[in-house]
Image (spheres, grey):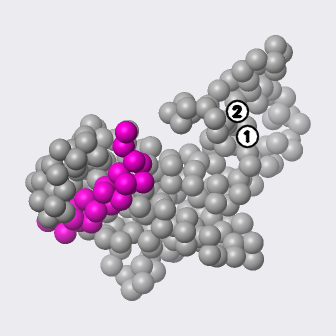
Amino acid sequence: MTNPQTDDALKETLLDAALPHVVFDGWNRTSFEAAIRDSGLDPAVARALCPRGAVDLAIAFHKRGDRAMAERAAEMDLTAQRYRDRIMGLVRLRIEVISDKEAARRAAALFALPLHAADGAKLIWDTSDLIWRTLGDTSEDINWYTKRATLSAVYSATFLFWLGDETAGNSATWAFLDRRIEDVMQIEKLKAKFRGNPLLKGVFAGPLWVAGKVRAPEAERPQDVPGYWENTETGND
């Protein structure tokens, strides 16, 4: 039986050994083989930890950033900020904790490939989910999805902008992020007006009823299942 903690530590060692090579070679077999050599790990162990080689290391690199953001956020007093500023602050923090911009650029190129696009989309979704959970989000209906989908779009757009930003202190990136967050806030205001308009609620009664049946995934459900349909008439999920 493998030890998850030991496996995680070994993968981190392998990732650290890979990063200097990724800058030049990308997340590919060449950098993965170099990481095995430089880390001193048994090749069989390394391949067992990362069956897809460098792709698994690129995923580990992104998740390392998520953990770093969560650790930094735990030390911050988010309650003293406006809600929009909390969201913007955590998106900015997630980008600021990226340890190697070129490695992140190479990862973006990797996950843009059709073969790995699903992995990239899941990583962005998980990052957005982590940000919302850090903010204490308790939504259980369709808002659980719309919040994460919207934030995924904001984060990915800001991240891609940051990759090409050469301004001092990434000032252009943070201005871009501020505009994207403002756009989202305008959408939320429109949604509030929609909910308060009796005429529109009547016109869209059917779609609203369907949306009201959507529920967020439960913690005990498999993580690869995005959600479920609630049957309120029978009481069964």
Quadrant where the C terminus sits is top right
Residue at 22 percent across and 49 percent down: it is: 46
| Magenta range | 1-25
Q: Confirm or deny contact between disc 2 and disc 1 (CB under 8 A).
A: yes
Question: According to the image, label 1 marks what residue?
Answer: 140
Residue 186 point in image, percent of width and height: 68, 58
- Asked if residue 96 shows in the view, the reply is yes
Q: Amino acid at mark 1?
A: Glu
Question: As displayed, is residue 29 above or below residue 234?
Answer: below
Q: Is residue 99 left or right of residue 196?
A: left
Q: Is residue 37 left or right of residue 221?
A: left
How many callouts does the rendering have?
A: 2
Residue 155 point in image, percent of width and height: 49, 58
Hey, which residue is sitting farthest front in the picture? 1
The front one of 8 and 66 is 8
Task: Answer with mark 2 or mark 1, whichever residue precedes in sequence.
Answer: 1
Question: According to the image, label 2 marks what residue?
Answer: 215
Q: Residues within 10 Å of mark 2 (few under 14, many from 20)?
A: many
Disc 2 to disc 1, C-alpha distance: 6 Å
Q: Residues within 10 Å of mark 1 (few under 14, many from 20)?
A: few
The front one of 5 and 59 is 5
